[in-house]
Image: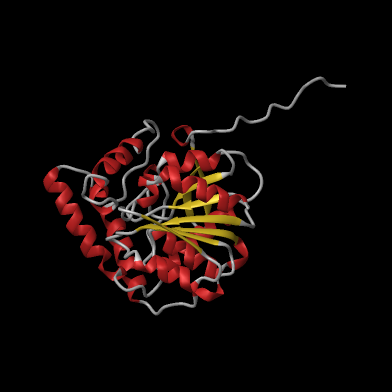
Amino acid sequence: MSNDKKVQPSIIAAYKDAPTSAVTAGGVTYAYRELGPKGGVPVIFLVHLAATMDNWDPRIIDPIAKKHHAITFSNAGVGSSSGKVPATVEEMADDAVTFIKALGFEKVDLFGLSLGGMIAQAMVIKHPGLVRKLILAGTGPAGGKGIDRVPAITYYDILRATLTRQDPKEFLFFNRNATGKPAAKAFIERLQERTTNRETPVRIKAFQTQLKAIRTWGRSQPVNLGVITQPTLIANGDNDRMVPSILSNSMHQRIPGSELIIYPDSGHGAIFQFHDRFVPAALEFLGR
């Protein structure tokens, strides 16, 4: 009788230490990172416009990964993933589903931020059986008034950031006041905690394609969000310049039984500014 004991793989607890893995499906090699305890329903994180896996706030990922299997990835044409960025949000959703199925999951929770939240909506409507729970942050529905202005606002804030030698996210995600400015600086610093194996920034062509897809999403016909029966948590700031905050209220009214959190004196990056308040709410929601 053998006395050998199986060595259990150590659980990666910090996002900055999560190795980058890859899986190939549908002709695309998807780069992804995972941490936290495996088993159960994983939380798939869908990132925002012009972002790679390195743009996730560790103060969001790390505490969620203490209790859940957390997976971030770069969709087709982004970061370390191959392929090209699709022209529509719906096609991005199809790629995300391909990635999830390639990992062998039959049920997942989706956490979508901004563009990622649009992708999450498209996924749950087309593949309802795949999704258990839904978190939508700083995002809006198809046909949402004002979403088609995202490209103009983005280019304007990139210009402002360039002229002042700051990160565009400081303008796009946070209020430019005594509360928002220090929150922005702290967020940008946290994104630098990972010092090795970082991804290549999103290429200009990929960024432009994402912007066009968001504009198309904003100008498309509204869809029936009433078909979403999954428990849904919606979060935003009260002054989202990119995706108007009123659209979070609209989704809340249209998705049956959904919950809404609006944080004061904050914008598109409210969940980063209020990570200490948002994470407990997200964990309570996911853990029910």
In the image, residue 216 sits, relative to residue 276, either above or below, namely: below
Q: Residue at x 69, y 26 (%)?
A: 7
* Residue 31 appears in view: no
Residue at the far right: name it.
1
Q: Residue at x 55, y 47 (%)?
A: 283
Picture quadrant where residue 188 is located: top left
Horizontal and vertical percent position of residue 205: 27, 57
Residue at the far top: name it.
3
* Residue 108 appears in view: yes
Horizontal and vertical percent position of residue 227: 56, 74
For residue 72, side relative to residue 88 (left or right): right
Picture quadrant where residue 10 is located: top right
In the image, residue 104 sits, relative to residue 38, either above or below, namely: below
Q: Residue at x 39, y 46 (%)?
A: 274
Residue at the far left: name it.
163
Picture quadrant where residue 46 is located: bottom left
Near-viewer residue (210 or 145): 145
Q: How is the image coloured?
A: secondary structure
Horizontal and vertical percent position of residue 247: 37, 68
For residue 188, side relative to residue 39 (left or right): left
Circle count: 0
> Could you tell me which quadrant the N terminus lies in?
top right
Q: Residue at x 38, y 42 (%)?
A: 54
Horizontal and vertical percent position of residue 207: 29, 57
Residue at the far bottom: name it.
221
